[in-house]
Amino acid sequence: MIDPQANAPSLKHFPLPLFAIVLGIAGLGLAWRDAGRVLGAPALVGELLLLVAALAFGLIAIAYLLKWQRYPAAVAAEFRHPVRGNFIFAITVGLILLSNALLPHRPDLAGGLWLLATIMHLVLAGWLVRRLLLQPAPLATLTPAIFIPLVGNILAPLAGMKLGYPALSWFSFSVGLGLWIAIQPVLLHRLFYGEALPPKLMPALAILLAPPSVGCMAMATLQGGRIEAPAWIMAGIAGFIALVLLSLLPRFARLPFAPSWWAYTFPSAAFALMLIQIIAARPAEAHAAIGWIALSAASVIVALIAFRTLAAALGGHLFKPEE
């Protein structure tokens, strides 16, 4: 007998991947903050976006804690999910980004938050690697979302070097870079020659843009703000991936809306931030117009997806079981 309440909106179905909202908005806020310094953009825009990201983190965390309290079995099942489970790590990545947001205003709080989030992410990433070594997952379950837990460490130097943690910044970056180099070929093999991703997971392809974009910025930060050969290599990889993703835009536009659309946001914001930082470091080789184009595109993407998410939330669709 079919339960008529099975598909009714409920906190039980509040999706863990919504923590990606924080990544997208915070990444865009940091891009606008740097655009204020480099491109002459309104400084207030970035700070407001970062405030919205912090508020979003608080609201999503409260909702998910309530879900954990009322429906612990549903949370445990989501944590074990081969794709959705990766978004547990969006929590620690979000906190690392929020430490960047706090840095100019409260460096003391930013330092504590960064240290907590960075160590937590390293510990959880180590646990995931250990689990995969002991219980290998089917190749068909591998998606670009795996970069969130295993490569998220490369974000650490962006704030860590300014906060006075060079050793931990280098260690975190090395772990993230090493895992990216190891996993990228396996992931591309799965995407090229394995089963096609289902439509609801297609937005995850945008995540391929994040590691080289962030990696370029992290390398520059570790080298005192200089864009040298390793950072240029990462920037080139990011540029190539961005062009491939741009060619897929008509395909992405035909996909039905889902929370997975937030996978578009942080990579596009990170790419814009990377270009802005390259413009700041090498103005003779990078034109400001490129930064404005990338920043505008990332802003439109975040605004559109935020609007669709709000509409889905008001309609109760975010609180229904995944189809």
Image (tube, rainbow, N blue to C red):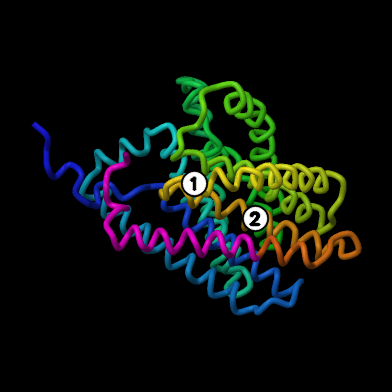
Q: Which residue is mark 1?
A: 254
The dot on residue 270 is 2
Residue 305 point in image, percent of width and height: 47, 58
Characterize the magenta stretch by its predominant secondary structure: helix
For label 2, the crowd category at 10 Å Cα-Cα, with few meaning under 14, some 14 to 19 and many 20 or more, is many
> In the figure, 97 relative to 216: above or below?
below
Q: Residue at x 44, y 40 (%)?
A: 200
Q: Describe residue 120's horizontal placement relative to residue 269 as left or right.
A: left
> In the figure, 118 relative to 315: above or below?
above
- Quarter of the picture containing the C terminus is top left
Q: Give 172 or 213, whichever is nearer the viewer.
A: 213
Q: Secondary structure at mark 2?
A: helix
The segment highlighted magenta reads 296-323
Q: Describe residue 174's horizontal placement relative to residue 229 as left or right.
A: left
Q: Indicate yes or no whether the magenta region holds residue 316.
A: yes
Total marks in image: 2
Residue 189 point in image, percent of width and height: 62, 24
Q: Is residue 233 visible?
A: yes
Q: Residue at x 38, y 34 (%)?
A: 81
Residue 69 point in image, percent of width and height: 23, 50
Q: Residue at x 32, y 41 (%)?
A: 322
Q: Is residue 172 visible?
A: no
Q: Secondary structure at mark 1?
A: loop
Q: Which comes sooner in the sequence, label 2 or label 1?
A: 1
Q: Indicate yes or no whether the magenta region holds residue 223.
A: no
Instruction: Tell me which amino acid carries mark 1.
Output: Arg
